[in-house]
Image (cartoon, grey):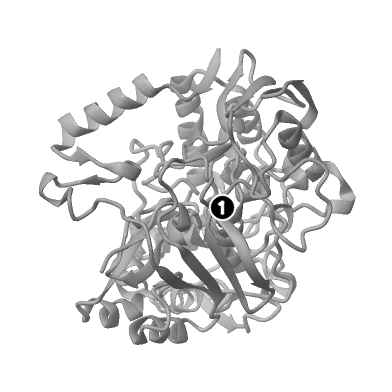
Amino acid sequence: MSKYSNDPDMERRRILQAVAVTGLTATLGGVLVHPGAVQAATPRQGGRIRVASLSSSIADTLDPAKGSLSTDYARHYMLYSGLTQYDTDLAAQPALATSLESDDQIHWTIKIRADVQFHNGKSLTSADVVYSLLRHKDPAVASKMAAIAEQFSEIKVTGPLELTMRLSGPNADLPVILADSHFLVVPDGTTEFRTANGTGPYRLKSFQPGIRTVVIRNENYWKPGRPYIDEIELIGIPDETSRVNALLSGDVQLISAVNPRQTRRIHATDTHKVVETKSGLYTDLIMRADSHPTSNPDFVLAMKYLLNRNLIKKALFRGYAEIGNDHPIAPSDRYFSPDLPQREYDPDLAKYHLQKSGLAGVRIPMYASPAAPGSVDTASLLQEAASRIGLKLAVNRVPADGYWSNHWMKHPLGFGNINPRPTADLKFSLFFKSDAPWNVSGWVNHQFDELVVAARAESDEQKRRQMYADMQEIVHTKCGVGIPVFISLLDAHDARIKGLGSIPIGGLMGYSFADHIWLVD
């Protein structure tokens, strides 16, 4: 039986174990700090801050189902709550749901927290949750999660604070999926989003799409004592240098998406800090299996051995990255397989496989763009290394504008960029399964496909872990995707802001910063 529940005794044991192992002391908000820092780290209420994300648009929305930019996600987590929420390992923790239980990973019983109020004073019921989940299946809503919601075969109210859910197939990751910002809960029957009526930590004060969002503290928030900040203004500043300048000048107090090259400027001050979040973000070298010459397995291996991962980590990302091993599971992921040998930069092996492929001396175009961070510099490093072994790579640098529609996955040899995903299943299903819409390398491996489906249904954690290890090995060995590093997410903030940590689904603490931070004098 799969059981996901809010067990205070279990949580207490987990915290005590962490204290025993690390010598740390737990304080409010789940933050672990050194014993001597407990008083300094105690949350306090009050204050106003401005926060700058990297994007904003006139299409900015108050509808969680339609969020498409980082500023949308941050706005929605301020205003609404979900059934579950991510922890620092991207596992699901209780939120509006107190438990999600299933015997077969298909039929789920979900119990809802009592005494939760929407911002207009309405009490939360299971009918609100059923409506919030089923609306993603309505084509008129145009939900960004419509494809995921297809597995919601049936959802029914079985009590004021209980509902049942039947999936089209077993999926042990349902609690994690429901933590996504698109699945945040809205009142039953809501069809217009000119304002926001949620159960989140903040109430909407004003909203100007493409300009700013201002929220104020929700005094009736279901988490006692939270949130801490009185008022938050959220804006978008697309240019990264301008974002850093705004932070250092005091115009804003928290920013996301800092370029590693800018970290020295921030570290040079006594008034600002950088927060690194190790993540599953990566820029991948794509070698299409359905095109020539990248369908040649020896050419693929030659390119993988030419990836100087340590140099890419140090020179391109200033050390703010983790070494990759040509599969999408990062070392920080709980399903990462440490037993798979690390592929190293090896020009001799690259030359051997190049000669075996029969492509030595052949001119091969390679497409890169600033749209895929680090791809232009990685292409230059590959071009230089390839020239030493007799491979002629012609780098075509194309503009960021239109890259994803005109070039991504459309050339035999090119680059992509994949944002973090909360589960191993989503990483494999979206980008590597044969029938995936974004099967970036165009490969087909039936053994891999069968493992993806089987792992999704497996409730035995040890067996599931082995399945994901097997998938990593198959992708590493046979797939035409090279993943040199996993890129860290970098935020920066005024040092007076406390409580900011890492949730590796995205910057700004997985976009949920507003629920955690406070301001000191």
Give percent across and percent down for residue 466. Answer: 45, 26
Residue found 35% across the figure and 65% down from its top? 308
Give percent across and percent down for residue 368. Answer: 57, 76
Residue situated furthest right in the rendering: 140
Q: Nearer the viewer, residue 344 or 260?
A: 260
Q: Nearer the viewer, residue 218 or 233?
A: 218
- Judging from the image, what secondary structure is the residue with disc 1 in? helix
Residue found 17% across the figure and 40% down from its top? 24
Q: Nearer the viewer, residue 497 or 420?
A: 497
The image quadrant that residue 72 belongs to is bottom right
Q: Which residue is mark 1?
A: 297
Q: Give amino acid for label 1.
A: Pro
Left or right: residue 322 compared with residue 441: left
Whether residue 242 is situated above or below residue 482 in the rendered picture: below
Left or right: residue 82 compared with residue 347: right
Give percent across and percent down for residue 339. Answer: 34, 35
Q: How many marks?
A: 1
Whether residue 213 is situated above or below residue 158 in the rendered picture: below
Residue situated furthest left in the rendering: 36
* Placement of the C terminus among the 4 image quadrants: bottom left
Give percent across and percent down for residue 457. Answer: 62, 23
* Placement of the N terminus among the 4 image quadrants: top right
* Residue 199 appears in view: yes
* Residue 302 appears in view: no
Whether residue 130 is situated above or below residue 346 in the rendered picture: above
Tell me if mark 1 has few (under 14), some (14-19) or many (20+) residues whose alpha carbon lies within 10 angstroms of its own: some
Left or right: residue 416 compared with residue 383: right
